[in-house]
Image (tube, helix red, strand yellow):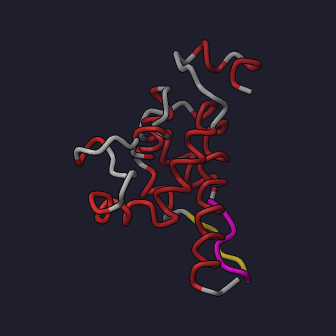
Amino acid sequence: MFAACGAAVAHGGGGDGGKRLRALAAYRYGGGLSFCADCRATPGFSCARFGGEGACPEDTHAPQSVEGRALAAIGASLAHQRRIGPAGYAGLDMPACLAMTEAQGIPTSVAALLLPFWELGLLQASARNRETEGKS
């Protein structure tokens, strides 16, 4: 997607079309960070940070482009810019997110390409959390 529109070349990224951003958001907000506390005790899954041989999703899903890393760095702030509907979380407030990313120095044209992938990851995490809590 990015290569077709020239964004990957123009902005120095080797992007994979947003899959890493989506996966990182889904991991972080789907309970992923809570796994770190139990990582050492999980046989075969302990990441290298704790002396294991497994790969931490924070590392495997880390964005490759500068803009993707910048967006992931402000991900917690972006997650608070949400739209709530009758069924719960409905997505991001894109105008607010674009203003935040622009203030962080991420070009609006690039943020407009990346934010939908972050939003999709948040929606996947929200759906997984609803299933886990039995609210689906």
Residue 59, image x, y percentages? 40, 39
Q: Give the range drawn in magenta.
A: 87-92
The x and y percentages for residue 23 are 57, 48
Quadrant of the rendering where the C terminus is positioned: bottom right
Q: Is residue 56 above or below residue 107?
A: below
Residue 34 lies left or right of residue 25; in this view the side is left
Q: Quadrant of the N terminus?
A: top right
Q: Which residue is drawn at 57% across and 46% down?
A: 98
Would residue 77 be counted in the magenta stretch?
A: no
31 and 63: which is toward the camera: 31
Foreground of the two, 24 or 75? 24
> In terms of image quadrants, where is residue 33?
bottom left
Q: Which of 50 and 57 is in front in this view?
A: 50
Residue 24 lies, in percent from the top left, at 51, 48
Describe residue 67's horizontal placement relative to residue 8 as left or right. Answer: left
In the rendered view, tell whether residue 3 sits above or below residue 129: above
Left of 118 or right of it: where is 73?
left
Residue shown at 49%/62% (left/top)?
29
Which residue is at 62% across, 60% downward?
93
Vertical placement of 16 versus 86: above or below?
A: above
Instruction: From this view, report whether residue 49 is shown above or below residue 68.
Output: below
Q: Residue furthest left?
A: 51
* Residue at the farthest bottom position: 134
36 and 113: which is toward the camera:
36
Residue 90 position, x and y percent, is: 69, 69
